[in-house]
Amino acid sequence: MKRMNENLFSLAFLAGLTLFTACSDDETTDNGGDNPTSETTLTGSITEDVTLTSGTTYRLSGQYIVEEGATLTIEPGVQIVAVHDDIVDYILVKQGARIEAEGTASSPIIMTSEQKEPGAWGGIHICGRAHTNVEGGTGSSEIGNATYGGNDDADNSGTLRYVRVEYTGYAFDEEHEANGISFYGVGSGTTVDHCQAYRGSDDGFEFFGGSVNISNMVVTDCSDDSFDWTEGWNGTATNLIATQESEETLGYACDCLIEADNNENNYGATPVSAPTIQNAILIGNGAAGNGVHLRRGTQVKMENVQIYGKGDALHVESPETENALLDGTSTMSHVKISGVVLSGEGTYTNEEFEADGNESNQVNPYSSYDDIIAENSWAAGWTQSWNESSNALADGSTLIGEISEDVTLGAGNTYYLSGQYIVREGATLNIEEGVTLIAKYDEIVDYILIEQGAKINAVGTADAPIVMTSEREEAGAWGGIHICGRAHTNAEGGGYSEIGNAPYGGDVEDDNSGTLQYVRVEYTGYAFDEEHEANGISFYGVGNGTTVDHCQAYKGSDDGFEFFGGSVNVSDMVVVSCSDDSFDWTEGWNGTGTNLMAYQEAESSLGYACDCLIEADNNGDNNLAEPVAHPNLSNLLLVGNGADGRGVRLREGTQVTMDNARICGKSMPLTVETEPTENALLDGTSSLTNITISADFVSEEGIFTTDNFLAGEGNSVDTSLSIASLNDAIAACDWIEGSWVKVD
């Protein structure tokens, strides 16, 4: 029966792909004006403004030309994927047109390809009306044959901010290979910052004249030049990083870190190329060749530049270029190079270079991309590093086994989970907004385990949450997420996770296991045996350096969220119809919980009963174990499913500070039991304030009584308190915004 279900799912999935393709092929933007949907294939030309909507993935097939007068607006988190077929894909922005591509550090715009290989597609080409020193003052772009150049150096072609282009460099022929982004006569009115070219087969960024200024730019493993200029470019470039992984691991060689010309046909052509380069870290791949190659009459001003990892870190040639360095027209200040200057003319030598206060024969101080990031925080979060050859998993990949290096699940993609997926110490699993992760329906138990010293950075948004679900949409279908940290536990001798048997606990209260934001886990609770059922998310000794907010557990067969010790703080958490407890803590958890909502659908419609809304222990084997569980909870709405049973159950020595809670839908909405728990409430170590319950308070030991409860500030029993539906519960929580909470 299970195999039949798998086959049916596969047929449905394939049918959906067929429908997607059919719709996409028919939906072009030739007529301009319409804003594409997620099923739109970008192709042809636009003559009116078009907007690509935040967090959406689009396909690119063939040329996509923004004609004069039109603007292509690309919102944060958009992903454009070039189709892997026989058509050459590229984006061309003509003179008088604009591209307004503004991502953010947490939601960059990513332009990539179905084929994750250098040279897969043709990149971006922008043509402006600023100067070029080609004969006649105007030229035609190498790709698309569009006119560029003029005399408007303040020309504005739009904005590129937090944009990453991957796997560009398609070779049209031997003379025409596409860069990551090509700037043809682009003016200084254009804004370009925080852009990365990743693993292209030609240049990362190339400038054909123009006056555009750039800043915060990264080029990673492009096989030709990282940065390239010609035809009179004279803008500024501030904060540059170029890195090249070794040829042995990369699989291909890389050329220059910077290749710089004035004009290959006329070294004296004016206006002369003379950009200003400030704050650059340029690291080659150890191969013979040039790092920075200044030639063909270019001028330059360089300040605070480091060049390492090439046989000839700094190569200067042509009389015009070397003379400009000698007479001060060009300048170098605080430049460090590995090796010595190679002078083609023998006039600007290493001695001349060092005489200006620069340093040769320097050792590369950076052993990893993280070292560079530590000095350049502007590049953190939105860039891919030089050693991430397997970092970005392709859409549709299956997660299985373990990872010992960082892996990224790309925004908007769908992935599959088969069996255990373990993030080992030192590795980080990055999950971007809008990712869907589907546990396969087979005989293998699926779960994600984050070991001590590893991290999960799963950062969705209110309207593009990360969803972890199952092919089988039933409670108990898969094993959820298990995070092991180094914060305290009061378990004797430390602890091992119930799932995966991984150690947890320690004394690092600010331990950081990563970030969970806008994450929904569905249909968890797989029962390994009677003692080991998987929660939605299990926090084992997780420290308060970890960020957890806006998470939902939906229809699991065990607890929604359970805390085994630790100090992690959580906020904006929702549990819907988990059959055991919605929230559960034990072993000394003492973090904060703010804005907590639990809702249990009626058993008659749900098909199964649900246990507590909160079940809270200190330690089941030793009620007095230290450190004592004592979370600080505020702003709670807890709605049971009308069955007999407990709502909030405080027991086995736990302490708690709870303020502003409404608890209804259970015959015993609030129960306290065991002497240590009740005594802590009686002597004020624990406190309950502003609590409204829908039925009588219950004290198992008779120590902290109903009278004591009602004497607490703002506490009351209101038998009319009820919430009719999940939608009503959501409406009552003003902190729930967007579409991240699943209702049905």
Image: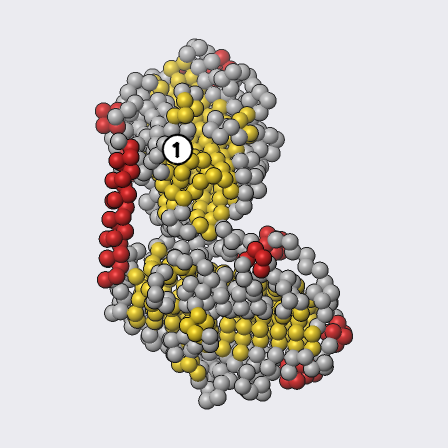
Residue at the disc numbered 1: 444
Way the structure is coloured? secondary structure
- Point out residue 673 in the picture as x, y percentages from the top left corner: 44, 14
Residue 527 at x, y percent in the picture: 39, 25
Q: Position of residue 46 (x, y in %)?
A: 30, 70
Give the tally of numbered discs.
Answer: 1
Residue 548 in picture, x, y percent from top left? 46, 39
- Going 28% across and 24% down the picture, which residue do you hit? 608
Q: Circle 1 — which element?
A: loop
247 versus 330 height, above or below:
above
State the residue in front, 654 or 330. Answer: 330
Image: 382 above or below 423: below
The correct choice, above or below, for 406 with respect to 697 in the image is: below
| Nearest to the observer: residue 568 or residue 86 | 86
Location of residue 699 by image quarter: top left
Q: Residue at x 49, y 85 (%)?
A: 134
Q: Is residue 696 at least partly visible in the picture? A: yes
Q: On the rendered image, what quadrant is the C terminus found in?
A: top left
Q: Label 1: few (<14), some or many (≥20) within 10 Å?
A: few
Q: Residue furthest top?
A: 702
Along the horizontal axis of the image, is 195 left or right of 13? right
Measuring 56% from the left and 81% from the top, which residue is drawn there? 262
Give above or below for 725 relative to 370: above
Front-most of residues 657 and 517: 517
Residue visible at 49% across and 12% down? Answer: 675
Furthest toward the bottom, the residue is 136
Q: Quadrant of residue 127?
A: bottom left
Q: What is the three-letter code of the residue carrying label 1?
A: Ile
Q: Examine the rendering and report whether any part of residue 80 can be seen.
A: no
Residue closest to the eye, 196 or 710:
196
Quadrant location, the N terminus: top left
